[in-house]
Image (tube, coloured by chain):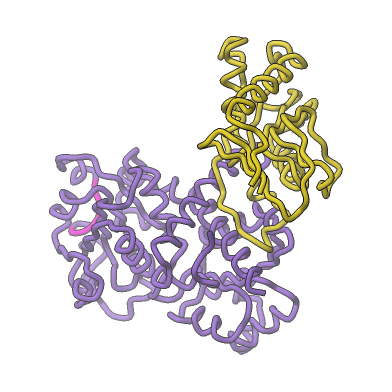
Amino acid sequence: MKTILTAQQLGITIKRLAHQVLETHINLENTVLIGLQPRGIFLSDKIVEEIKKEILADKIQYGKLDITFYRDDIRKELHNANQTDIPFSIENKKVVLIDDVLYTGRTIRAALDALLDFGRPEKVELCVLIDRSFSRQYPIQADYAGKSIDSIVSQKVKVEWAKNEVVLY
Amino acid sequence: MQLSTRNLLGIKDLTPDDISLILSTATQFKEVLQRPVKKVPSLRDVTIVNLFYENSTRTRFSFELAEKRLSADTINFAVSGSSAAKGETLLDTVTNILSMKVDMVVMRHSASGAPHFLAKHIPAAIINAGDGVNEHPTQGLLDAFSMKEKFGKLDGLRVAIIGDIMHSRVAMSNIYLLNKMGAKVTVCGPPTLIPKYISEAFGVEVNYNLKETLEWCDVANVLRIQLERQNQVLFSSLREYNLAYGLKRNLLDSLKKEITVMHPGPINRGVEIDSDVADSKQSIILQQVENGVAVRMAVLYLLAGRNSVNN
Protein backbone atom coordinates (compact mmCIF):
# COMPACT_ATOMS: atom_id res chain seq x y z
CA MET A 1 0.00 0.00 0.00
CA LYS A 2 1.30 3.40 -0.93
CA THR A 3 -0.04 6.78 0.10
CA ILE A 4 -0.50 9.05 -2.91
CA LEU A 5 -1.84 12.08 -1.08
CA THR A 6 -1.57 12.69 2.66
CA ALA A 7 -4.27 14.55 4.57
CA GLN A 8 -2.33 17.80 4.28
CA GLN A 9 -1.70 17.38 0.52
CA LEU A 10 -5.35 16.43 -0.01
CA GLY A 11 -6.53 19.66 1.63
CA ILE A 12 -4.19 21.77 -0.50
CA THR A 13 -5.14 19.92 -3.70
CA ILE A 14 -8.87 20.40 -3.10
CA LYS A 15 -8.28 24.13 -2.50
CA ARG A 16 -6.36 24.33 -5.78
CA LEU A 17 -9.13 22.53 -7.71
CA ALA A 18 -11.75 24.90 -6.26
CA HIS A 19 -9.67 27.92 -7.25
CA GLN A 20 -9.00 26.56 -10.74
CA VAL A 21 -12.73 26.09 -11.31
CA LEU A 22 -13.37 29.65 -10.07
CA GLU A 23 -10.56 31.03 -12.21
CA THR A 24 -12.22 29.69 -15.36
CA HIS A 25 -15.78 30.40 -14.22
CA ILE A 26 -15.64 33.83 -12.55
CA ASN A 27 -18.33 34.03 -9.81
CA LEU A 28 -19.84 30.84 -11.29
CA GLU A 29 -22.04 32.96 -13.54
CA ASN A 30 -24.01 30.61 -15.76
CA THR A 31 -22.01 27.67 -14.31
CA VAL A 32 -23.36 24.79 -12.23
CA LEU A 33 -21.47 22.14 -10.26
CA ILE A 34 -22.62 18.51 -10.30
CA GLY A 35 -21.05 15.80 -8.13
CA LEU A 36 -21.31 12.16 -9.19
CA GLN A 37 -22.86 9.67 -6.75
CA PRO A 38 -21.74 8.03 -4.65
CA ARG A 39 -18.02 8.70 -4.18
CA GLY A 40 -17.70 11.95 -6.13
CA ILE A 41 -19.95 13.68 -3.59
CA PHE A 42 -17.25 13.69 -0.90
CA LEU A 43 -15.01 15.70 -3.23
CA SER A 44 -17.74 17.97 -4.61
CA ASP A 45 -18.96 18.81 -1.07
CA LYS A 46 -15.43 19.88 -0.14
CA ILE A 47 -14.95 21.88 -3.34
CA VAL A 48 -18.25 23.68 -2.76
CA GLU A 49 -17.11 24.46 0.82
CA GLU A 50 -13.96 26.06 -0.56
CA ILE A 51 -15.86 28.01 -3.21
CA LYS A 52 -18.21 29.36 -0.52
CA LYS A 53 -15.21 31.11 1.04
CA GLU A 54 -14.77 33.10 -2.17
CA ILE A 55 -18.28 33.87 -3.44
CA LEU A 56 -21.77 34.16 -1.94
CA ALA A 57 -23.40 30.81 -1.20
CA ASP A 58 -26.60 31.70 -3.10
CA LYS A 59 -24.57 32.16 -6.31
CA ILE A 60 -23.62 28.46 -6.20
CA GLN A 61 -25.83 25.98 -8.01
CA TYR A 62 -24.79 22.54 -6.82
CA GLY A 63 -26.45 19.22 -7.71
CA LYS A 64 -25.86 15.50 -7.33
CA LEU A 65 -26.19 12.97 -10.13
CA ASP A 66 -26.50 9.19 -9.87
CA ILE A 67 -25.59 7.26 -13.00
CA THR A 68 -26.55 3.72 -11.93
CA PHE A 69 -29.37 3.38 -14.49
CA TYR A 70 -27.06 4.50 -17.32
CA ARG A 71 -24.20 2.08 -16.69
CA ASP A 72 -23.08 -0.18 -19.53
CA ASP A 73 -22.38 -3.11 -17.19
CA ILE A 74 -25.78 -3.80 -15.61
CA ARG A 75 -25.77 -7.18 -17.35
CA LYS A 76 -22.64 -8.03 -15.37
CA GLU A 77 -23.27 -6.51 -11.99
CA LEU A 78 -26.06 -4.57 -10.29
CA HIS A 79 -25.11 -1.48 -8.35
CA ASN A 80 -27.24 0.18 -5.73
CA ALA A 81 -28.91 3.36 -6.93
CA ASN A 82 -28.30 6.61 -5.05
CA GLN A 83 -30.17 9.87 -4.89
CA THR A 84 -30.12 12.27 -7.83
CA ASP A 85 -30.85 15.87 -6.86
CA ILE A 86 -30.52 18.57 -9.52
CA PRO A 87 -32.90 21.31 -8.33
CA PHE A 88 -32.16 23.70 -11.24
CA SER A 89 -32.19 23.72 -15.03
CA ILE A 90 -28.93 22.93 -16.84
CA GLU A 91 -30.25 24.21 -20.18
CA ASN A 92 -27.52 26.37 -21.80
CA LYS A 93 -25.46 26.30 -18.58
CA LYS A 94 -21.79 25.40 -18.21
CA VAL A 95 -21.60 22.21 -16.17
CA VAL A 96 -18.58 21.09 -14.13
CA LEU A 97 -18.86 17.37 -13.35
CA ILE A 98 -16.98 16.31 -10.24
CA ASP A 99 -15.79 12.77 -9.42
CA ASP A 100 -13.06 11.30 -7.25
CA VAL A 101 -11.11 8.99 -9.59
CA LEU A 102 -11.00 9.03 -13.41
CA TYR A 103 -10.04 5.53 -14.58
CA THR A 104 -11.62 3.82 -17.62
CA GLY A 105 -13.87 6.77 -18.48
CA ARG A 106 -16.98 4.59 -18.50
CA THR A 107 -18.57 6.34 -15.52
CA ILE A 108 -18.15 9.71 -17.20
CA ARG A 109 -19.58 8.33 -20.46
CA ALA A 110 -22.68 7.24 -18.49
CA ALA A 111 -22.75 10.58 -16.64
CA LEU A 112 -22.86 12.48 -19.95
CA ASP A 113 -25.85 10.39 -21.05
CA ALA A 114 -27.60 10.95 -17.72
CA LEU A 115 -26.84 14.68 -17.79
CA LEU A 116 -28.38 15.14 -21.25
CA ASP A 117 -31.71 13.85 -19.90
CA PHE A 118 -31.88 17.03 -17.80
CA GLY A 119 -31.38 19.41 -20.72
CA ARG A 120 -28.78 20.64 -23.21
CA PRO A 121 -25.83 22.24 -21.44
CA GLU A 122 -23.68 24.81 -23.25
CA LYS A 123 -20.49 23.08 -22.15
CA VAL A 124 -19.47 20.21 -19.89
CA GLU A 125 -16.15 20.08 -18.04
CA LEU A 126 -14.70 17.39 -15.81
CA CYS A 127 -12.95 17.84 -12.47
CA VAL A 128 -11.36 14.84 -10.72
CA LEU A 129 -9.12 14.36 -7.72
CA ILE A 130 -7.08 11.49 -9.18
CA ASP A 131 -6.47 10.90 -12.89
CA ARG A 132 -5.22 7.37 -13.61
CA SER A 133 -3.51 8.01 -16.91
CA PHE A 134 -2.88 5.29 -19.56
CA SER A 135 -5.94 3.29 -18.43
CA ARG A 136 -8.73 4.99 -20.35
CA GLN A 137 -11.14 2.85 -22.42
CA TYR A 138 -13.08 5.82 -23.85
CA PRO A 139 -11.75 9.11 -25.29
CA ILE A 140 -12.42 11.17 -22.16
CA GLN A 141 -10.06 13.47 -20.27
CA ALA A 142 -10.23 15.72 -17.21
CA ASP A 143 -10.18 19.52 -17.41
CA TYR A 144 -9.07 19.82 -13.79
CA ALA A 145 -7.08 17.03 -12.13
CA GLY A 146 -5.80 16.98 -8.56
CA LYS A 147 -3.01 14.53 -9.30
CA SER A 148 -2.14 12.31 -12.24
CA ILE A 149 -0.72 8.90 -11.44
CA ASP A 150 0.56 5.98 -13.47
CA SER A 151 -0.90 2.72 -12.24
CA ILE A 152 -1.49 -0.73 -13.66
CA VAL A 153 -4.88 -2.41 -14.00
CA SER A 154 -4.35 -4.80 -11.08
CA GLN A 155 -3.81 -1.88 -8.71
CA LYS A 156 -6.59 -0.03 -6.93
CA VAL A 157 -6.73 3.64 -6.09
CA LYS A 158 -8.89 4.53 -3.15
CA VAL A 159 -9.72 7.88 -1.65
CA GLU A 160 -10.13 7.25 2.07
CA TRP A 161 -12.34 10.18 3.04
CA ALA A 162 -12.58 8.96 6.63
CA LYS A 163 -8.79 9.19 7.00
CA ASN A 164 -8.47 12.06 4.51
CA GLU A 165 -5.87 10.40 2.31
CA VAL A 166 -5.50 8.77 -1.09
CA VAL A 167 -3.87 5.34 -1.26
CA LEU A 168 -2.73 2.97 -3.99
CA TYR A 169 -2.76 -0.76 -3.36
CA MET B 1 -26.76 -5.96 -3.72
CA GLN B 2 -29.30 -8.05 -5.56
CA LEU B 3 -32.60 -9.88 -5.05
CA SER B 4 -32.59 -13.38 -3.58
CA THR B 5 -35.03 -14.60 -6.22
CA ARG B 6 -34.99 -14.70 -10.03
CA ASN B 7 -38.76 -14.37 -10.43
CA LEU B 8 -41.32 -12.28 -8.59
CA LEU B 9 -44.09 -14.81 -8.00
CA GLY B 10 -45.25 -13.47 -4.67
CA ILE B 11 -44.22 -11.45 -1.63
CA LYS B 12 -44.20 -14.80 0.20
CA ASP B 13 -40.82 -15.66 -1.43
CA LEU B 14 -39.14 -12.31 -0.72
CA THR B 15 -36.87 -11.54 2.23
CA PRO B 16 -37.16 -8.26 4.18
CA ASP B 17 -33.86 -7.23 2.50
CA ASP B 18 -35.38 -7.85 -0.95
CA ILE B 19 -38.36 -5.68 -0.05
CA SER B 20 -36.13 -2.88 1.27
CA LEU B 21 -33.98 -3.04 -1.88
CA ILE B 22 -37.04 -2.81 -4.17
CA LEU B 23 -38.50 0.11 -2.19
CA SER B 24 -35.22 2.07 -2.09
CA THR B 25 -34.61 1.48 -5.81
CA ALA B 26 -38.18 2.65 -6.49
CA THR B 27 -37.40 5.92 -4.68
CA GLN B 28 -34.66 6.61 -7.23
CA PHE B 29 -36.96 5.70 -10.14
CA LYS B 30 -39.60 8.05 -8.77
CA GLU B 31 -37.02 10.84 -9.13
CA VAL B 32 -36.34 9.73 -12.73
CA LEU B 33 -40.07 10.19 -13.43
CA GLN B 34 -39.84 13.88 -12.41
CA ARG B 35 -37.09 14.63 -14.99
CA PRO B 36 -37.61 16.38 -18.32
CA VAL B 37 -36.69 13.07 -20.02
CA LYS B 38 -38.51 10.41 -17.98
CA LYS B 39 -36.56 7.52 -19.40
CA VAL B 40 -33.33 5.64 -18.68
CA PRO B 41 -31.50 3.21 -20.99
CA SER B 42 -31.05 0.39 -18.42
CA LEU B 43 -33.09 -2.35 -20.14
CA ARG B 44 -32.60 -1.39 -23.78
CA ASP B 45 -31.42 -4.95 -24.61
CA VAL B 46 -34.36 -6.64 -22.85
CA THR B 47 -37.65 -7.75 -24.42
CA ILE B 48 -40.68 -8.18 -22.19
CA VAL B 49 -44.03 -9.78 -22.97
CA ASN B 50 -47.12 -8.68 -21.06
CA LEU B 51 -49.46 -11.68 -20.90
CA PHE B 52 -52.85 -10.66 -19.60
CA TYR B 53 -55.28 -13.55 -19.36
CA GLU B 54 -57.54 -11.41 -17.21
CA ASN B 55 -58.84 -7.85 -17.55
CA SER B 56 -56.69 -5.01 -16.29
CA THR B 57 -56.32 -1.29 -16.89
CA ARG B 58 -54.06 0.14 -14.20
CA THR B 59 -51.68 -2.78 -13.82
CA ARG B 60 -51.21 -3.32 -17.55
CA PHE B 61 -50.66 0.37 -18.32
CA SER B 62 -48.42 0.71 -15.31
CA PHE B 63 -46.22 -2.23 -16.34
CA GLU B 64 -46.11 -1.06 -19.94
CA LEU B 65 -45.09 2.46 -18.94
CA ALA B 66 -42.48 1.09 -16.53
CA GLU B 67 -41.04 -1.10 -19.30
CA LYS B 68 -40.95 1.77 -21.80
CA ARG B 69 -39.33 4.13 -19.30
CA LEU B 70 -36.58 1.55 -18.83
CA SER B 71 -36.16 1.41 -22.65
CA ALA B 72 -37.20 -2.26 -22.85
CA ASP B 73 -38.97 -3.57 -25.95
CA THR B 74 -42.49 -4.73 -25.13
CA ILE B 75 -45.12 -6.90 -26.71
CA ASN B 76 -48.65 -7.20 -25.41
CA PHE B 77 -50.90 -10.19 -25.29
CA ALA B 78 -54.58 -10.10 -24.45
CA VAL B 79 -56.49 -13.35 -24.44
CA SER B 80 -59.25 -12.11 -26.72
CA GLY B 81 -57.87 -11.94 -30.24
CA SER B 82 -55.12 -14.47 -29.48
CA SER B 83 -54.71 -18.17 -30.19
CA ALA B 84 -55.56 -18.94 -26.57
CA ALA B 85 -59.15 -18.37 -27.68
CA LYS B 86 -58.60 -21.25 -30.15
CA GLY B 87 -57.63 -23.60 -27.33
CA GLU B 88 -53.85 -23.27 -27.12
CA THR B 89 -52.50 -24.12 -23.67
CA LEU B 90 -50.75 -21.58 -21.46
CA LEU B 91 -47.41 -23.39 -21.71
CA ASP B 92 -47.64 -23.65 -25.51
CA THR B 93 -48.46 -19.97 -25.85
CA VAL B 94 -45.54 -18.95 -23.65
CA THR B 95 -42.93 -21.29 -25.19
CA ASN B 96 -43.94 -20.02 -28.63
CA ILE B 97 -43.50 -16.42 -27.54
CA LEU B 98 -40.16 -17.23 -25.86
CA SER B 99 -38.84 -18.86 -29.02
CA MET B 100 -39.00 -15.35 -30.47
CA LYS B 101 -36.29 -14.37 -27.93
CA VAL B 102 -38.22 -12.77 -25.11
CA ASP B 103 -36.39 -12.26 -21.80
CA MET B 104 -39.11 -11.55 -19.27
CA VAL B 105 -42.78 -12.40 -18.82
CA VAL B 106 -45.27 -10.25 -16.93
CA MET B 107 -48.37 -12.35 -16.38
CA ARG B 108 -51.85 -11.97 -14.99
CA HIS B 109 -54.03 -15.06 -14.83
CA SER B 110 -57.34 -15.98 -13.21
CA ALA B 111 -55.91 -19.30 -11.95
CA SER B 112 -53.97 -19.09 -8.68
CA GLY B 113 -50.50 -20.56 -9.16
CA ALA B 114 -50.35 -20.07 -12.94
CA PRO B 115 -47.07 -18.08 -12.81
CA HIS B 116 -45.57 -20.65 -10.41
CA PHE B 117 -46.41 -23.39 -12.90
CA LEU B 118 -44.82 -21.41 -15.70
CA ALA B 119 -41.69 -20.67 -13.64
CA LYS B 120 -41.01 -24.42 -13.40
CA HIS B 121 -41.07 -24.85 -17.16
CA ILE B 122 -39.48 -21.81 -18.77
CA PRO B 123 -36.11 -20.06 -18.33
CA ALA B 124 -37.39 -16.46 -18.66
CA ALA B 125 -37.93 -14.32 -15.56
CA ILE B 126 -41.58 -14.18 -14.53
CA ILE B 127 -43.33 -11.33 -12.76
CA ASN B 128 -46.71 -12.12 -11.32
CA ALA B 129 -49.17 -9.31 -12.11
CA GLY B 130 -51.95 -11.04 -10.17
CA ASP B 131 -52.89 -14.72 -10.09
CA GLY B 132 -56.44 -15.63 -9.09
CA VAL B 133 -56.96 -15.21 -5.36
CA ASN B 134 -53.30 -15.84 -4.48
CA GLU B 135 -51.03 -12.79 -4.78
CA HIS B 136 -50.55 -9.46 -6.55
CA PRO B 137 -46.98 -8.73 -5.43
CA THR B 138 -46.35 -5.44 -7.25
CA GLN B 139 -49.57 -4.03 -5.76
CA GLY B 140 -48.37 -5.06 -2.30
CA LEU B 141 -45.04 -3.36 -2.98
CA LEU B 142 -46.57 -0.15 -4.27
CA ASP B 143 -48.97 -0.02 -1.31
CA ALA B 144 -45.98 -0.41 1.02
CA PHE B 145 -44.04 2.23 -0.92
CA SER B 146 -46.96 4.67 -0.62
CA MET B 147 -47.32 3.99 3.12
CA LYS B 148 -43.59 4.42 3.64
CA GLU B 149 -43.63 7.65 1.66
CA LYS B 150 -46.47 9.00 3.80
CA PHE B 151 -45.33 7.79 7.24
CA GLY B 152 -41.55 7.42 6.80
CA LYS B 153 -41.49 3.80 7.96
CA LEU B 154 -43.46 0.55 7.94
CA ASP B 155 -42.24 -0.85 11.25
CA GLY B 156 -44.98 -0.45 13.86
CA LEU B 157 -47.46 1.08 11.39
CA ARG B 158 -51.07 0.04 12.02
CA VAL B 159 -52.76 -1.02 8.83
CA ALA B 160 -56.41 -2.06 8.46
CA ILE B 161 -57.35 -4.08 5.39
CA ILE B 162 -61.07 -3.71 4.90
CA GLY B 163 -63.55 -5.59 2.72
CA ASP B 164 -63.46 -8.72 0.61
CA ILE B 165 -60.41 -10.44 2.14
CA MET B 166 -61.53 -13.88 0.94
CA HIS B 167 -61.21 -13.12 -2.77
CA SER B 168 -58.41 -10.57 -2.64
CA ARG B 169 -54.88 -11.23 -3.88
CA VAL B 170 -54.08 -7.65 -2.91
CA ALA B 171 -54.91 -8.50 0.71
CA MET B 172 -52.64 -11.57 0.61
CA SER B 173 -49.65 -9.66 -0.77
CA ASN B 174 -50.22 -6.82 1.68
CA ILE B 175 -50.43 -9.19 4.65
CA TYR B 176 -47.22 -11.06 3.70
CA LEU B 177 -45.36 -7.82 3.12
CA LEU B 178 -46.55 -5.90 6.17
CA ASN B 179 -45.82 -8.92 8.41
CA LYS B 180 -42.27 -9.15 7.05
CA MET B 181 -41.65 -5.44 7.54
CA GLY B 182 -42.95 -5.28 11.11
CA ALA B 183 -46.28 -3.49 10.56
CA LYS B 184 -49.40 -4.50 12.47
CA VAL B 185 -52.36 -5.71 10.42
CA THR B 186 -56.05 -5.99 11.22
CA VAL B 187 -58.49 -7.34 8.66
CA CYS B 188 -62.07 -6.16 8.78
CA GLY B 189 -65.20 -7.15 6.87
CA PRO B 190 -68.30 -9.29 7.08
CA PRO B 191 -67.56 -12.79 8.49
CA THR B 192 -68.55 -14.38 5.18
CA LEU B 193 -65.74 -12.49 3.39
CA ILE B 194 -62.96 -13.26 5.88
CA PRO B 195 -61.29 -16.71 5.75
CA LYS B 196 -61.99 -18.59 8.96
CA TYR B 197 -58.42 -19.37 10.05
CA ILE B 198 -56.72 -16.23 8.74
CA SER B 199 -55.71 -15.12 12.23
CA GLU B 200 -53.95 -18.43 13.03
CA ALA B 201 -52.42 -18.73 9.55
CA PHE B 202 -51.03 -15.21 9.12
CA GLY B 203 -50.91 -13.69 12.60
CA VAL B 204 -53.27 -10.85 11.76
CA GLU B 205 -56.05 -9.50 13.98
CA VAL B 206 -59.63 -9.92 12.86
CA ASN B 207 -62.26 -7.35 13.77
CA TYR B 208 -65.79 -7.42 12.37
CA ASN B 209 -66.52 -3.90 13.62
CA LEU B 210 -65.57 -1.18 11.12
CA LYS B 211 -65.65 1.77 13.53
CA GLU B 212 -63.40 0.03 16.08
CA THR B 213 -60.97 -0.95 13.33
CA LEU B 214 -60.79 2.61 12.01
CA GLU B 215 -60.21 4.00 15.52
CA TRP B 216 -57.23 1.64 15.83
CA CYS B 217 -55.49 2.09 12.47
CA ASP B 218 -53.17 4.66 10.85
CA VAL B 219 -54.01 3.49 7.33
CA ALA B 220 -57.19 1.93 5.95
CA ASN B 221 -56.59 -0.07 2.77
CA VAL B 222 -60.07 -0.58 1.33
CA LEU B 223 -60.58 -3.48 -1.08
CA ARG B 224 -62.98 -3.85 -3.94
CA ILE B 225 -65.92 -6.22 -3.62
CA GLN B 226 -64.99 -8.83 -6.24
CA LEU B 227 -68.41 -9.86 -7.51
CA GLU B 228 -66.82 -11.71 -10.45
CA ARG B 229 -65.13 -14.18 -8.09
CA GLN B 230 -68.12 -14.78 -5.82
CA ASN B 231 -70.16 -17.77 -6.94
CA GLN B 232 -72.55 -17.70 -4.01
CA VAL B 233 -74.39 -15.04 -2.07
CA LEU B 234 -72.03 -13.82 0.67
CA PHE B 235 -73.93 -10.70 1.71
CA SER B 236 -77.50 -9.65 1.07
CA SER B 237 -77.03 -6.59 -1.12
CA LEU B 238 -74.46 -4.02 -2.20
CA ARG B 239 -76.48 -1.35 -0.41
CA GLU B 240 -76.43 -3.30 2.83
CA TYR B 241 -72.68 -3.87 2.45
CA ASN B 242 -72.22 -0.14 1.95
CA LEU B 243 -74.19 0.65 5.10
CA ALA B 244 -72.20 -1.79 7.24
CA TYR B 245 -68.68 -1.70 5.77
CA GLY B 246 -68.51 1.20 3.31
CA LEU B 247 -66.10 4.05 4.16
CA LYS B 248 -68.22 7.15 4.66
CA ARG B 249 -67.41 10.77 5.31
CA ASN B 250 -69.39 11.04 8.56
CA LEU B 251 -67.76 7.87 9.87
CA LEU B 252 -64.25 9.24 9.21
CA ASP B 253 -65.20 12.61 10.72
CA SER B 254 -66.41 10.88 13.89
CA LEU B 255 -62.95 9.37 14.54
CA LYS B 256 -60.58 10.92 17.06
CA LYS B 257 -57.78 11.15 14.47
CA GLU B 258 -57.27 11.57 10.72
CA ILE B 259 -56.46 8.29 9.04
CA THR B 260 -55.05 7.73 5.54
CA VAL B 261 -57.27 5.97 3.02
CA MET B 262 -55.96 3.67 0.27
CA HIS B 263 -57.66 1.59 -2.43
CA PRO B 264 -55.98 -0.61 -5.07
CA GLY B 265 -58.65 0.25 -7.69
CA PRO B 266 -60.89 -0.10 -9.56
CA ILE B 267 -63.22 1.67 -7.14
CA ASN B 268 -66.87 0.71 -6.79
CA ARG B 269 -68.06 4.16 -5.74
CA GLY B 270 -70.87 3.98 -3.21
CA VAL B 271 -70.12 0.35 -2.33
CA GLU B 272 -66.87 -0.11 -0.40
CA ILE B 273 -66.00 3.58 -0.43
CA ASP B 274 -68.03 6.76 -0.95
CA SER B 275 -66.95 9.44 -3.42
CA ASP B 276 -66.47 12.13 -0.77
CA VAL B 277 -63.91 9.83 0.91
CA ALA B 278 -62.18 8.56 -2.23
CA ASP B 279 -61.69 12.11 -3.56
CA SER B 280 -60.76 13.72 -0.23
CA LYS B 281 -57.30 14.83 0.88
CA GLN B 282 -57.16 11.87 3.27
CA SER B 283 -57.05 9.56 0.26
CA ILE B 284 -53.73 8.66 -1.43
CA ILE B 285 -55.36 6.54 -4.13
CA LEU B 286 -53.89 8.51 -7.03
CA GLN B 287 -50.44 8.62 -5.40
CA GLN B 288 -50.63 4.81 -5.26
CA VAL B 289 -51.17 4.73 -9.03
CA GLU B 290 -48.28 7.17 -9.60
CA ASN B 291 -45.96 5.15 -7.35
CA GLY B 292 -46.93 1.96 -9.18
CA VAL B 293 -44.81 2.87 -12.20
CA ALA B 294 -41.69 3.57 -10.10
CA VAL B 295 -42.12 0.36 -8.08
CA ARG B 296 -42.57 -1.75 -11.23
CA MET B 297 -39.51 -0.13 -12.79
CA ALA B 298 -37.54 -1.16 -9.70
CA VAL B 299 -38.77 -4.77 -9.90
CA LEU B 300 -38.04 -5.07 -13.64
CA TYR B 301 -34.63 -3.45 -13.26
CA LEU B 302 -33.56 -5.64 -10.34
CA LEU B 303 -34.82 -8.88 -11.95
CA ALA B 304 -33.25 -8.12 -15.34
CA GLY B 305 -29.88 -7.58 -13.67
CA ARG B 306 -30.32 -10.63 -11.48
CA ASN B 307 -31.02 -12.95 -14.38
CA SER B 308 -28.12 -11.87 -16.52
CA VAL B 309 -25.80 -12.61 -13.59
CA ASN B 310 -26.84 -16.25 -13.77
CA ASN B 311 -26.74 -16.65 -17.51
- Specify whether residue B37 is painted magenta: no
Residue A65 visible to the viewer: no
Relative height, residue B22 to residue A34 (above, below):
below
Q: Residue furthest front?
A: A2
* Residue B91 x/y as whole percent: 60, 86
Along the viewing direction, whichever of B156 and B295 lies nearer the viewer: B156
Q: Colour of chain A?
A: yellow
Q: Residue at x 19, y 43 (%)?
A: B250
Residue B165 left/right relative to B58: left
Q: Is residue B28 left or right of residue B259?
A: right
Q: Nearer the viewer, residue B28 or B79?
A: B28
Q: Is residue B264 visible?
A: yes
Q: Would you say A80 lies left or right of B220 here?
A: right
Query: Please, is residue A34 above or below residue B271 in the view?
Result: above
Q: Main secondary structure of the magenta part?
A: loop
Q: Nearer the viewer, residue A11 or B185?
A: A11
Whether residue B246 is in magenta: the answer is yes
In the image, residue B245 lies at what x, y percent?
A: 21, 58
- B188, A71: nearer the viewer: A71
Residue B106 image-quadrant placement: bottom right
Please tell me which residue is depicted at 17% across the width and 55% down the height of the picture. Answer: B213
Q: Residue B273: percent from the left, percent from the top?
A: 30, 53
Give the residue at the far right of this rendering.
A139
| Figure colour of chain B | purple
Give the magenta part as a residue range: B244-248
Tally the marks: 0
User: Which residue is located at x 39 percent, y 75 percent?
Assistant: B134
Question: Residue B59: percent from the left, percent from the top?
Answer: 52, 61
The residue sitting at 33% across, 43% down in the picture is B151
The vertical placement of A10 against A117, above or below, is above
